[in-house]
Structures are given as C-alpha cells and as structure tokens.
Amino acid sequence: MMETRDYTTSFAVDQSPEEVFKAVNCVRGWWSEEIQGATDELGAEFRFHHKDVHRSTQKIVELTPGQKVIWHVTESRLSFVEDKNEWTGTNIVFEIAKKDDKTELRFTHVGLVPAFECYGGCSGAWGFYIGNSLRSLITTGKGQPIQKHPHRNDADKESTPTMNGTEFNRTSRNRYGRHGKV
C-alpha cells in the first residue's frame, strides 16, 4: 500500500499569531532572498529559483491574518528527480493557532508524500527552512534564507526585509560596516 501522508512539521513560539503570520509572509527573510514577486498579497504569485536545482511558482490562494496562509504551486521544475514537475499542483499550508500561552505554527506541504522521489531531499530542506530559518526569523527577527547570488549587479539587489518592518541592504551594510563607516 502506497503511503500518502503529506510532509508536515510544527513548532510553538512565544510570539503572537500576528507576529508569526507576518514572518511567514516575509518569505525573503527565511526561504530565499532571490524570491521574485509579492509574497503577502492574496492572489499574488511569486517565484523561487535556486541554481539549476529547483524553481517553482507559488500563487497565494488563502491569506487569513494571524491564522492561515496557503500557496498553490502552479509550476515547478526539480532537476534532481525523474518527474521534474513533482511539486506542480501541490499546496503549501501554514496554520497558526494559539495553544495555551504559545503560538503554534503547523506547516504542511499537501501532496509532498513519501511516494515522491524528492520526498527525502525536499522534506529535509523544509525541515531546515521551517524549523530553523522561519523559527529564527520569528523568535530573533533574523532568518537564514538562501543568500543572493554574489555575482549579481548591485542595481539588481533588492532590500532584505526584517521583522521590525525596516529594510536593509546586505551589500551596503557589508560595504560600510556595522555603523555605516568604512
């Protein structure tokens, strides 16, 4: 019998459901700095691309503040598996709920099941980006997203969002040091 259990993981934090929701939608702050498109508007589409290994387009199909975010994967290409489109048609779900004095985030990639060739690699990657990077963004204000490609032209660089709502440009910060001086 084929196992059909979707990949899921969860954790609890001290922050409010609203803070967790804000962090989930700050995708450049925890998944990849090279995300293209809006990540916090219902109906918007954004693209993830990592080298020649993985690219996908996600459409935001549900955005309920402080409670739930759902992305529908409209297109995908995974170079490391036979069925390059394994993610296409799957849903990525973030459910946020108050549990006692904590906020629980439950992440489920609906359709990412053990029968998929990419399940091992993809579930391991999600484990890191959700359990480490997103959790860190929520609890400390700084995640561990895939960094912008170092050979990009400075004019192509976008600001990287942080949790306090301000934006900073990693290149400028590195160039001018911590206190804005060379």
Image (cartoon, grey):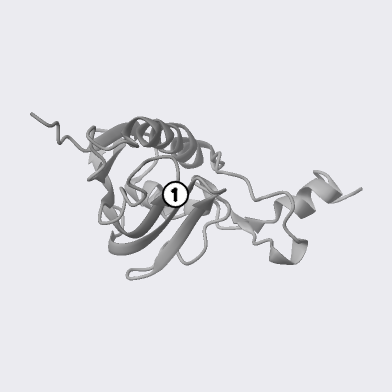
Residue with the most extreme right position = 182
Residue with the most extreme front position = 82
The answer to whether residue 54 is above or below residue 155 is above
The answer to whether residue 140 is above or below residue 168 is above
Residue with the most extreme left position = 1
Please report the residue visible at 38 percent of the width from the left and 46 percent of the height from the top.
Answer: 20
Residue with the most extreme bottom position = 43
The foreground one among 100 and 6 is 6
Please report the residue visible at 33 percent of the width from the left and 71 percent of the height from the top.
Answer: 43
Please report the residue visible at 69 percent of the width from the left and 61 percent of the height from the top.
Answer: 157
Please report the residue visible at 76 percent of the width from the left and 52 percent of the height from the top.
Answer: 171
Q: Which residue is mark 1?
A: 23
Tally the marks.
1
Q: Is residue 73 left or right of residue 137?
A: left
Q: Position of residue 105 (x, y in %)?
A: 31, 40
In the rendered structure, which amino acid carries the disc numbered 1? Ala
Q: Position of residue 136 (x, y in %)?
A: 49, 36
Q: Position of residue 154 (x, y in %)?
A: 76, 61
Q: Position of residue 60 (x, y in %)?
A: 33, 63
Q: Is residue 127 left or right of residue 162?
A: left
Q: Is residue 29 left or right of residue 60?
A: right
The foreground one among 114 and 159 is 114
Give neighbour class at mark 1: few <14, some 14-19, many 20+ (Cα, 10 Å): many
